Amino acid sequence: MRQFKLSRRMFLASTVASVAFAGKIANAATPKDAQIENIIANMSLEEKAGQLSIFADGTRSNNPNINPAAAKQGIEEVKEQIRKGTLGSLFSAKGAEGAREYQRVAIEESKSKVPLIFAADIIHGCETQFPIPLGEASSFDLDLCERTAKMAAFEATAVGIQWTFAPMVDVARDQRWGRVAEGAGEDTYLGNQIARARIKGFQGGDLTSETTVLACPKHYAAYGAVQGGMDYNTSDIPETTLRDVHLPPFKAAFDAGALSTMTSFNDINGVPSTGNHHLLTDILRDEWGFKGLVVSDYTADEEMIKHGYAKDGRDAAKKSIIAGCDISMQSHLYNLHLPDLVKSGEVPMEVVDESVRRVLYVKKQLGLFENPYRSLDPKREKTDIRTPKAIALSREAARKSAVLLKNDNNILPMKKSGQKIALIGPLANDKYQTLGTWAIFPDYDNAVTLEKGLRNQISNQSLIKSVKGCEIEKPISGGIQKAVEAAKWADVVILAIGEKQEMSGEAQSRVEITIPKPQQDLAEAIAKTGKPVIIILSHGRALALSGAVKDANAIMCAWFLGSEHGNGLADLIFGDYSPQGRLPVSFPVYSGQQPYYYNHRPTGRPQGPKDERFYKARYIETDNVALYSFGHGLSYSKIEYSKPNLSAKTLNFTNSIRASATITNKGKRTVKEVVQLYINDNVASLTRPVRELKGFKLIELAPGESKEVSFEISATDLAFINHDLQRRAEKGGFTLWIAPSSVTGEAVGFELV
Ligand code: GLC
């Protein structure tokens, strides 16, 4: 190992710094392992910096646009970096054969022989795409979320990927933010449950398994709180909100075993997450005892210069490593500056060693030291992707993720024969608009559009006429005319409209979350024909619906449902299955209401019934309500809820009470129902949300069947982050609902004494 001489001043500086950091590191120290300590002891500073660096692999990416900078690299150049130990992981590529060769170089030709990790953004499927995460969250089906994550891991490991930069667990309350598409929506409780399910799916019970991947709940933290819903913007929130709303899904993910996390691009109250010691060390390590690794988002360390938080790359590297960001993504800053920062005494060696220790610890947990070729088996690529099981799961997930918002006169489900259908709109038959954002290795050829799905189920193909009518963002000359003619010919119109998939996801914030005007004009023209209209929306966020779209006979949220988009929708439209989806985000009346979320605080002038309109918390143009609220969704049956019954009217800090309601299917078909438990803390030392989701149960009800659904409630369920940043329940009155959405249900009260 190369030694370097420390001057007396440098020695003192590094000693003082070390003592300061030793306390911190000691609190959250990574378990000591002889093999790991031996590797660290024999690593040069340059090799340590290499272990703490991850780069996009441009040599094996099927989509060079993902990382143009990396696309210029050659295989030999990457191999040389691996030999020199200047990189510890690669991402954004697939292919077991190529990864296997890079791994061979790492363990046979490099000095430290530390295996690489191969990563990618497997966000909602790998070769088989599932619904975008926001869509899948609509299912409120935790078992489904776990199974799709497990299948995504199965396929990812079949193509040489061992680490996924997922699940995204950012709570998003502003639908202008394009990345709401990647997560579980606006509610923390739902976010916690889905985070847990997805971690279990990705990591399984054995991280050394050939078919599980390391998960990476992201983006830590408060990325969903960016001001104005503008991506990469500032998040200015009190620590009570940070801890009450935005951190819990990360804690849930770590408690479920997640061993990595990714820093977010935003600053929190002026401190960028990647250089945020309070976030990355005080909370993550010292409070939560997180033992995994922290990776920066793409050049997020270097972006601290643009944030005005770091003077230059060297300063950014110093702030990042000292804050607790273990791996630098794509910026090269750790390669360039860590050796010098340690030699100068500005960064103690043990800070670097602790980060290397964490990275090696995680690699060991993945079994890579014993089995470096884990999940790098080229044979699996031929047998384990797009299997019938994966396709069937994708179709099931599509069915369960669509949300039926409106169904006047039960126009849905439709018959498969005996009626003429005009299928109109730019989202009806565009395979590129089925998979949604972050389909990193997209297989559009096999993607099933709505039209294909409908035609797959109809024997007489002459009964469907398909007319685009307009493009997604621009009119087609004569398009509306053709569409109107088709509508006049038909008995019913299915209007497939919405966003293109590029309008959500990263760097896709919108000021107006509306249907693009050419499509709105098309809808208005179709409405004038007087024909019944069923709207099938494609979208990556909640939308502000208006005019003929809002007034259509039926509206279904179809998000981007993945490889089986069209088949899943056809299963619902023709009634083979009943919709079970419920909204994970509120649909506002106007874009201008953003950020709008159901669990808002009451204010001192909450708006009462319609007539209380003046001097109330509302807008001139609208009451501050949702057009369709969080938790809303219809099935093909009529479901009735009894008033909740409580086992006791008072609760103390050591016992629990049971809240129950009887749910009855008054219709003629078996349906799924998402029974939701909401609670309001009437009076507290901080104002509390008008309602908060505290539980939900997905049940099945046969025609005429009644089921009693119960929830156990303890003081823990009533706790919130207090002034002193402690999670605590307070005595007093509470209101409870067991309901089909966040704005319905009968209220009952109880006391915490
Ligand atoms: C992107 C995204 C992040 C992703 C990373 C690697 O910028 O913010 O979610 O995991 O880069 O692709």
Image (cartoon, grey):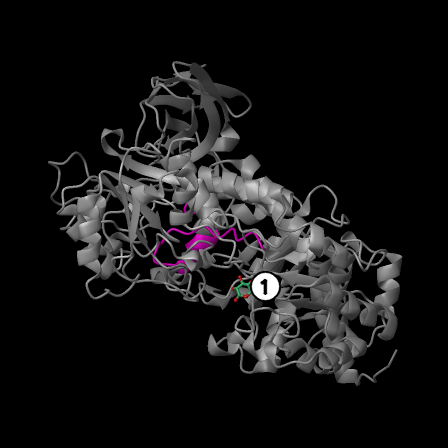
Report x, y in % for residue 285. Answer: 65, 54
Front residue (pair 547, 660):
547
Q: Is residue 464 above or below residue 692?
A: below
Q: Which residues are magenta?
A: 166-187
**Residue 618 visible (yes or no):** no
Report x, y in % for residue 683. Answer: 35, 34
Q: Amino acid at mark 1?
A: His
Secondary structure beneath dot 1 equals helix
Callout 1: CB less than 8 Å from ligand 1 = no
Where on the image, by quarter, is ligand 1?
Answer: bottom right
Report x, y in % for residue 217. Answer: 58, 53
Quarter of the image where the C terminus is located: top left
Q: Is residue 594 above or below residue 641?
A: below
Left or right: where does residue 234 sit relative to residue 262?
left
Front residue (pair 114, 440):
440
Q: Is residue 640 magenta?
A: no
Query: Which residue: 47% across, 74% down?
Result: 307
Quarter of the image where the N terminus is located: bottom right
Q: Is residue 380 above or below residue 88?
A: above
Left or right: where does residue 41 sit relative to residue 548?
right
Front residue (pair 70, 296):
70
Query: Which residue: 56% across, 83% down?
Result: 312
Q: Is residue 180 magenta?
A: yes
Reading the image, the residue beneath label 1 is 277
Report x, y in % for residue 698. Answer: 48, 28
Q: Is residue 20 above or below residue 202?
A: below
